[in-house]
Amino acid sequence: MSFFFEVLIGGLLSGVMYSLVALGFVLIYKASGVFNFAQGAMVFFAALTYVGLLEVGLAWWMAIPATLVVMVIVGLLTERFVLRPLVNQPQISLLMATIGLTFFIEGVAQLMWGANVRGLELGVQDEPIAWLMETANINVSRFDLMAALVAAILVTALALFFSRTRIGRALRAVADDHQAALAVGIPLQQIWAIVWGVAGAVALVAGLLWGARNGVQYALTFVALKALPVLILGGFESIPGAIVGGLIIGATEKLAEVYLGPFVGGGIEGWFPYVLALLFLLVRPEGLFGEKIIRRI
Amino acid sequence: MLYREAGQFKTSYEKDAAIFPILQDRIGMAVVLVVAFAVVPFVATPYVFTGILIPLLIFSLAALGLNILTGYAGQLSLGTAAFMAVGAFAAYNFMLRVPGIPVLVAFALAGVVAALVGILFGLPSLRIRGLYLVVATLAAQFFIVWFLTRVGWITNYSTSGVITAQQVVILGYAFTTPAAKYLLILSIVSLLALAAKNMARGNVGRSWMAVRDMDVAAEVIGIRLMRAKLLAFAVSSFYCGVAGALFAYLYLGTVEPEAFNLDLSFRILFMVIIGGVGTVMGSFLGAAFVTLLPVFLSVTVRFLDNILGLHIAESTISNLELIVFGGLIIFFLIVEPHGLARLWQIGKEKLRLWPFPH
C-alpha cells in the first residue's frame, strides 16, 4: 500500500510541474484567446538563457532578474510582431502562428547558447526526505516538494494579482469581453503586453524547475506539450483547472505506467495523458472548470 | 497578353465543368507533365533524384493529404506523420505476409488501413473542434508511434524495430534506379493529385468547405456532418498512408517508427501553410519550398564559406533553418494567409493585363 501512495504522491508532485507549464497557457488564453503553442519553447528558452548567463559568469541572483527581463522582452516582442498583426484572425491561424513561433524561439535559443545538454543546480537535492522515509516508508523527493511549494506560491501570487490589483481586474475584463473592455477605457494592447510579460515570467519558473529536474535540453519542449492534456482536463480558461488537471494527469500517468505498463510493454507515459484527455473530451468537452460552450443557430 | 481567357467561350456543359477551363492552363499543365515525365528523367543526376525530387513528390502527397483535412475540411491535425507510419508499416506487412501480392495493391491497401485508422482517430472530431481536436490528433501521433514500436508482430520481431522494405517489382521490372523510382512516384502522385483536384471541386469537396466555413450552417443545408468529417479524415489518411508507404519503399528503404515523429508532422503542416491552405497546387509548392530551403541554405553557406571564408557550423545551419521556417510561417500567416498558391494567383492576374498597367 505504501508503494501505491509513493507512486501517487510522486505523480501528484510531477503533476505540479505540468501545472506550472499549463499556467502559462491559461494566462494567455484567458486574456487574448490565443492558444500559445510556443509556451513550451519559452520554457526552454528561459532555462537555456539562465544557464547560459550562469556560464558567462553571472551569480544566480543576477541571472534570475536578467533572464526575467529577457523573457518579458520576448513576450513583448511576440505580442507586438506576431499577435497584434493577427488580431481577429481565426483561432486556427493564431495557433499555427504560435507553432511557427515555437520553431523560431527554439532556433534562436540554440543559436545563442548552443544545443548541448546542460545541468542546472538550484541548491535543492533530488533525494528522498529522510523523515517520511522512516515514519511512513514513503519515498518523496525533496525537490518535488519544493517544486510544489513554488507552484503554490506562484498560483497564490497570480490569484491575488488577478483579484486584488487594478491591472488584474482589467485583465479579467479583457478576458470577458474585448470590446466592452475597450469601451470602458481599458488599454487593450497594454494589457496584452502585460499578459505576455507575465507568461514569460511563468515560463522562467517552469523552465528553472524542469531544467533542474531533466537537464536543460531540447526535450523540454516536449514536456511542455504534456500541458495540452492538462488544459483539456482543466479547461482552457481556468487557473484552478490547470492545477487540478496537472495533478490528475501527473497521478494517473504515473499510476498507469506502474500498474498498466507491464501488461502492454511499458513506455505508456508518452501517450497516456493524451488518450485520457481524449476520452475525457468525449464526456465533457469543456473540461472540468471550463466555461460551458453554448451554441445557437 | 499571353495569359488571357478572352475569346474562350464555353459552349457546352462539359467545357464549363472542365478541370482546366482556360487554354493556357491546359498548355501549362501539359508542359509541366511532359517535362516531369519525359525530360527530367534524362537530365537529372542521381543526387537530384534522391536528394530533391523523390522526397519532394512524397512530401507533396502527404501535404496534399493534410491539406484535404486541414485546408478543405478545416480540421487541424498534428498526426500526419503517424498516419504515414501506418501506411508504411501496413504496406510492409502486406508484402511480407501475403504471398505474391502486387506492390501497387499493397500500397493501396496500406492507404486503406491508414484511412481506417484515420476514421478511428477522427471520431472525436464529431464532438470537439479546434484546439481540442489538435490534442486528439496529438494522441494519435504519440499512440500510433508507440504502438508500432511496441508490438513486435508489426515489425516482424526485428530487434531494433527497424524494417527493411522489400524490393519494388512491378510486372517483373525491379524499380532500383533513382530514375525508375522517380517515375513510379511521379505516376502515383499525379493520379492521386488529379483525384484530389476532382474531389475538391466536386460535391465532396464543397461539402468539406461548407463544414469548414461554418459547420452549423452546413448541417442546416443538409450536409451530414458525420459523413463529411469522417470522409475527410479517411481520404486524408489514405493519402498520407500511401505517402508513408512510398516514403518507406522508394525513399528510405529502411525505416523505424521513430522516423515518423512529431517533427515530421509539423514539417508537413508547414508545407500546407506556406504552400497555401485549401489548394491542391499549394501542397506541391509548399513541399517544394520546404524541401528546397535546406538545400538552398547549405548552398548559400558553402558559397559564403568559399568567397568570404566565413565558417558556419552544421548545427548553426540547422538552427538557422528552424528560425527561417518559424519566421516564414509567421510571415505568411500575417502577410499572405493563402500562401504561395495565392502569390501564383496574383501573378496570373498580373499576366492577364500585361503589358498594360490596367
Image (spheres, coloured by chain):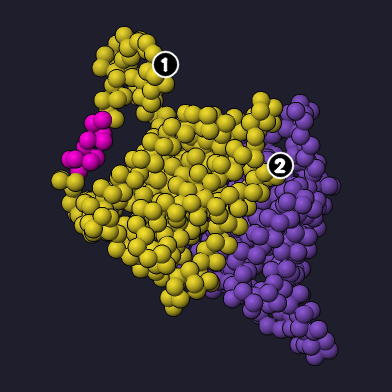
Chain colours: A purple, B yellow
Taking the image as shown, residue A33 lies to the left or right of residue B236, namely right
Q: Which residue is mark 1?
A: B13
The stretch of residues the image draws in magenta is B30-40
Q: Quadrant of residue A154?
A: bottom right
Label 2 is placed on what type of residue?
Answer: Ala
Say if residue B104 shows up in the picture. yes
Q: Which residue is mark 2?
A: A31
Residue at mark 1 shares a chain with residue at mark 2: no
Image coords of residue A291 (percent x, y): 79, 44
User: CB of mark 1 within 8 Å of CB of mark 2?
Assistant: no
Disc ID at residue B257: none
Label 1 is placed on what type of residue?
Answer: Tyr
Query: Element at badge 1?
Result: helix
Taking the image as shown, residue A150 lies to the left or right of residue B336, namely right
Image coords of residue B264 (percent x, y): 45, 55
Taking the image as shown, residue A137 lies to the left or right of residue B21, namely right
Which residue reaches farthest bottom? A134
Q: Is residue B179 magenta?
A: no
Image coords of residue A237 (percent x, y): 75, 47
Looking at this view, is B355 or B8 the one in front? B8
Q: Chain of mark 2?
A: A
Query: Element at badge 2?
Result: helix
Compared with A142, A35 (above or below) is above
Q: Chain of mark 1?
A: B
Quarter of the image that includes the N terminus of chain B: top left
Taking the image as shown, residue B177 lies to the left or right of residue B211, namely left
Say if residue B304 shows up in the picture. no
Residue in the picture at 17% in, 40% down: B39
Image coords of residue A230 (percent x, y): 70, 58
Looking at this view, is A288 or A65 the one in front? A288
